[in-house]
Amino acid sequence: MRITVFCASSRKVHNSYYQAVESVAERLVTSGAEVVYGGGGDGLMGHLADTVIAADGRIEGVIPQFMKDVEWQHEGLHSIRIVDDMRERKRLLLEGSDAVVALPGGCGTLEELLEAMTLKRLGQYLKPIVVVNVNGFYDGLIQQIGRSIADQFMDNRHADLWRLVDDPTLVVEAIEDSPAWGEDAIEFAAVK
C-alpha cells in the first residue's frame, strides 16, 4: 500500500499537530504502508519523514528543483524524486497512490487536498481521501464544501469524496472504510 500524505512545512505550529503527524506516520508504518510526501525537511513534513524512518518504515519524497535549490528537502529519505515544478509534483504524489491523507497545513496543503478532491469528483483519481481534522482545523473547509453541496454546486454524492477523522490513529480504518469510487463519477460531476 502506498499512501500520499499532505502536510505543512511550518516549524511554528502547535505541538498537537506534530503529535498528530506522529500518530499518522506510526499507524501507516504499522499497517505496512509506504509513505510518499512532498519531500520537505521542516515542520510537519520533516517530522513525518523522521517518524516513518525511526519506525523502520519506507518514505519517498517528491520535490521541485527550486525547493531543493534552497535546501528544503529532507536528507534522510529512502528515495527522493526531483521534479521541474509544483504541477509535476502534485501529479506524481497522486500517481500510483492507494490513498491520500491530508493533515493540517497552509495554502499548499489545501491546494493539494482540493485538487485530489476535484480529480476524484471527475473520476480521474479513484482512491480514498482521508482528512485528519486535528483541533477542528478543517471544520471551515468541510462546512464550505457542505454549503456547495446544499446550494447545488456539487451533487449530494460528493459528500463521499472524503472521510473525516478527528483521531489521527483512525486513519487506516478510514481508508479501509471509504466507499468505492468509479470512473463513472464523471457522469454526476456536473450538477444538472
Image (cartoon, rainbow, N blue to C red):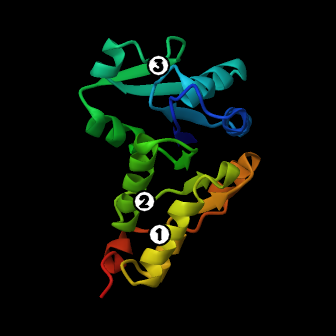
* Label 2 environment density (alpha carbons within 10 Å; few <14, some 14–19, many ≥20): many
In this orientation, which residue lies closer to the viewer: 69 or 11? 11
In this orientation, which residue lies closer to the viewer: 46 or 171? 46
Which residue in the structure is indicated by mark 2?
Answer: 117
Instruction: From the image, state whether disc 3 or disc 2 is nearer to you.
Output: 2
Q: Position of residue 51 (x, y in %)?
A: 68, 24
Which residue in the structure is indicated by mark 3?
Answer: 79
Q: Quadrant of the C terminus?
A: bottom left
Left or right placement of residue 192 versus residue 138 in this view: left
Q: Is residue 73 above or below residue 8?
A: above
Q: Earlier in the sequence, mark 1 or mark 2?
A: 2
Q: For numbered disc 2, what is the local secondary structure?
A: helix
Q: Quadrant of the N terminus?
A: top right
Quick check: marks 3 and 2 in contact, CB under 8 Å? Answer: no
Q: Earlier in the sequence, mark 3 or mark 2?
A: 3
Q: Amino acid at mark 1?
A: Ile
The Cα atoms of the two marked residues, 3 and 1, are separated by 35 Å
The part of the image, by quadrant, that contains residue 85 is top left
The part of the image, by quadrant, that contains residue 123 is bottom left
Which residue in the structure is indicated by mark 1?
Answer: 145
